[in-house]
């Protein structure tokens, strides 16, 4: 096929990607959107196979088959609680693939020389080095993110306060090496150096970032994987790579921003671990809780629920860890069958990636309309009879609103303390990611229901059934 | 150079289009959006196919790199679209 026809087909598949993403703006059209995007990808692959440059089909076919089998197995086997790890792997592989393409172009040029010259050559070379840099650090950074999420690596921030200077230095070395490669002052040894530096940079960038900030890291790496694909498109002058890469890059950047706003932190703050070095005045948990925490039983809480007209459930990652989402949905069903209005209030950073909690609830067949965002929920807490907090800690901590000295001051939270009654299901009074005590637990309208999340919720449901 | 400017314009326009589209995605669908858009970034498979399939005179190293890139990108594509489909079908079940 001639290149004009191929490019027109690439344009068509880029359009299918756009229509596909547009479909994702509504739950009703989302599945169709995803399928359209997949169709666009299939089209791009088939058209590329017809390109006259492709003459060794057995290698291509073997690669496609191997990748499809691994990808398919991953997609079918992965648990919904492990979705952040899955996305981290996919991000890393996307970056790695772009690195592979850039490296292949580099060595191909080295062996055969280029038809390009002058400024066109410079653009192609610079794109190549940029692809190598971004692709490689996406690859190693995602590997570290995966390790942290899978708890192979410790979740807390690792590193030392000077690490940002080392990162800066690595970046300078990488850019200088890349530039010398672009202008032809360095050979293949320089290329290997660039890859090595970028590999280390990916690791040292993600290592110091703690578990609580993972939603930001995942979103950012998502963006990088897209930018790497777009940069690879500049090497080959390929329009579909540029358009798709730009779409993914934009998506990641926007989600990164949403996550940062949800935690009231700047991107620089997250990247350089400001929160980890938070000021010295520690807040004494004993002082906050002393004699003011009320413990309760499932029977007592069930009496509260019997009379409630409106109940809001606030899930956190603790709920997912206890695999309690199905038990929670059963509780919600039981309440609804008694005529109680039940809603779920979901903080943007609940879970470990943007929207993760919604997926976990959807898995447990919670209705889409019952899931409310923080903005939708907050005005209604004062009209709520009982708020049930399960495994969510920092996102309900009133210190964020009231205590100017606290590290989370200014972070938008769910105003559960404004509900008539608050029930907190939790194993103990231990702090969450931010390491802070939660004054909510000591409020007059709050009771603690200590115990395993799943068991406590099942006991509640059973107590309600007895009452009926 | 002229073609570079055209490609750069394409990139800039696509970023704006992306921003417009993605700000309209509700928070509930952010995780599927991420895995789905990630699958789209697997479009690098196009470049990988050209590299791996480029024939004997490109050398074994180029073909090997192209092959690895095909495998990585295809995992990204197939895994990404498939798992997104899995998640989205859960949203449909009751809602």
Image (spheres, rainbow, N blue to C red):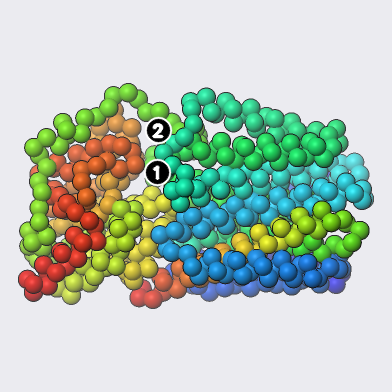
Question: 10 Å neighbourhood of mark 2: few (<14), some, or many (≥20)?
Answer: some
* Residue A91 x %, y %: 58, 53
Residue that numbered label 1 is attached to: A212
Circle 1 chain: A
Question: 10 Å neighbourhood of mark 1: few (<14), some, or many (≥20)?
Answer: many
Quadrant in which the C terminus of chain A is drawn: bottom left
Residue that numbered label 2 is attached to: A275
Instruction: List the single residue furthest toward the front.
Output: A152
Q: Of residues A263 and A16, which is closer to you in this image?
A: A263
Q: Is residue B15 visible?
A: no
Q: Is residue A189 visible?
A: yes
Q: Of residues B26 and A317, which is closer to you in this image?
A: A317
Q: Dividing the picture into quarters, in which one does residue A323 lie?
A: bottom left
Q: Dividing the picture into quarters, in which one does residue B55 lie?
A: bottom right
Quadrant in which the N terminus of chain A is drawn: bottom right
Q: Dividing the picture into quarters, in which one does residue A173 lie?
A: top right
Q: Is residue A21 left or right of residue A446?
A: right
Dots 1, 2 in contact, CB < 8 A: yes
Q: Is residue A90 left or right of residue A467?
A: right
Residue pictured at 45% horizontal, 51% vertical: A150
* Residue A59 x %, y %: 78, 67
């Amino acid at each position: 096929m001639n290149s004009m026809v191929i490019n027109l087909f690439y344009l068509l598949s880029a359009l299918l990607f756009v229509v596909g993403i547009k479909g994702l703006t509504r739950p009703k059209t989302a599945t169709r959107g995803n399928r359209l995007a997949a169709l666009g990808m299939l089209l791009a692959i088939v058209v590329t196979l017809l390109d006259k440059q492709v003459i060794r089909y057995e290698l291509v076919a073997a690669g496609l088959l191997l990748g499809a089998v691994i990808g398919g197995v991953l997609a079918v086997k992965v648990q919904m609680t492990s979705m952040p790890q899955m996305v981290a792997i996919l991000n890393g592989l996307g970056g790695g693939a772009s690195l592979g393409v850039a490296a292949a172009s580099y060595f191909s040029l080295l062996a055969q020389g280029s038809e390009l010259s002058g400024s066109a050559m410079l653009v192609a070379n610079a794109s190549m080095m940029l692809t190598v840099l971004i692709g490689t650090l996406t690859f190693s950074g995602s590997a570290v993110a995966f390790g942290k999420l899978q708890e192979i690596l410790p979740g807390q921030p690792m590193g030392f306060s000077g690490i940002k200077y080392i990162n800066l230095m690595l970046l300078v070395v990488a850019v200088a090496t890349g530039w010398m490669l672009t202008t032809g002052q360095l050979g293949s040894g320089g290329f290997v150096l660039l890859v090595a530096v970028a590999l280390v940079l990916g690791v040292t960038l993600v290592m110091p970032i703690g578990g609580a900030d993972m939603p930001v890291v995942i979103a950012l790496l998502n963006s990088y994987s897209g930018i790497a694909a777009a940069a690879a498109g500049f090497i080959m002058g390929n329009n579909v790579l540029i358009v798709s890469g730009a779409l993914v890059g934009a998506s990641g950047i926007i989600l990164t921003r949403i996550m940062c706003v949800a935690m009231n932190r700047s991107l620089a703050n997250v990247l350089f671990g400001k929160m980890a070095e938070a000021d010295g005045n520690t807040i004494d948990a004993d002082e906050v809780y002393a004699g003011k925490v009320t413990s309760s039983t499932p029977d007592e809480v069930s009496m509260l629920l019997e009379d409630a007209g409106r109940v809001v459930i606030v899930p956190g990652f603790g709920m997912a860890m206890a695999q309690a989402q199905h038990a929670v949905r059963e509780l919600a069903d039981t309440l609804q069958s008694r005529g109680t209005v039940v809603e779920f209030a979901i903080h943007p950073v609940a879970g470990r990636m943007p929207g993760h909690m919604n997926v976990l609830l959807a898995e447990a067949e919670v209705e889409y309309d019952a899931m409310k965002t923080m903005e939708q929920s907050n005005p209604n807490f004062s009209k709520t009879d009982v708020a049930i907090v399960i495994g969510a800690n920092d996102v309900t901590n009133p210190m964020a609103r009231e205590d100017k000295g606290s590290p989370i001051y200014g972070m938008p939270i769910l105003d559960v303390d404004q509900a008539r009654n608050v029930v907190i299901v939790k194993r103990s009074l231990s702090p969450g990611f931010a390491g802070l005590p939660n004054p909510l637990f000591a409020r007059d309208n709050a009771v603690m229901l200590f115990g395993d999340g799943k068991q406590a919720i099942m006991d509640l449901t059973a107590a309600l059934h007895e009452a009926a | 150079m002229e073609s570079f400017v055209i490609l750069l314009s394409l990139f800039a326009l696509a970023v704006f289009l992306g921003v417009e589209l993605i700000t309209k995605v509700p928070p509930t669908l952010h995780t599927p959006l991420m895995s789905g858009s990630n699958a789209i970034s697997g479009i690098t498979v196009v470049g990988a196919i050209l590299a791996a399939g480029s024939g004997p005179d490109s050398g074994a190293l180029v073909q090997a790199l192209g092959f690895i890139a095909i495998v990585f990108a295809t995992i990204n594509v197939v895994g990404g679209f498939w798992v997104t489909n899995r998640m989205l079908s859960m949203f449909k079940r009751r809602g």
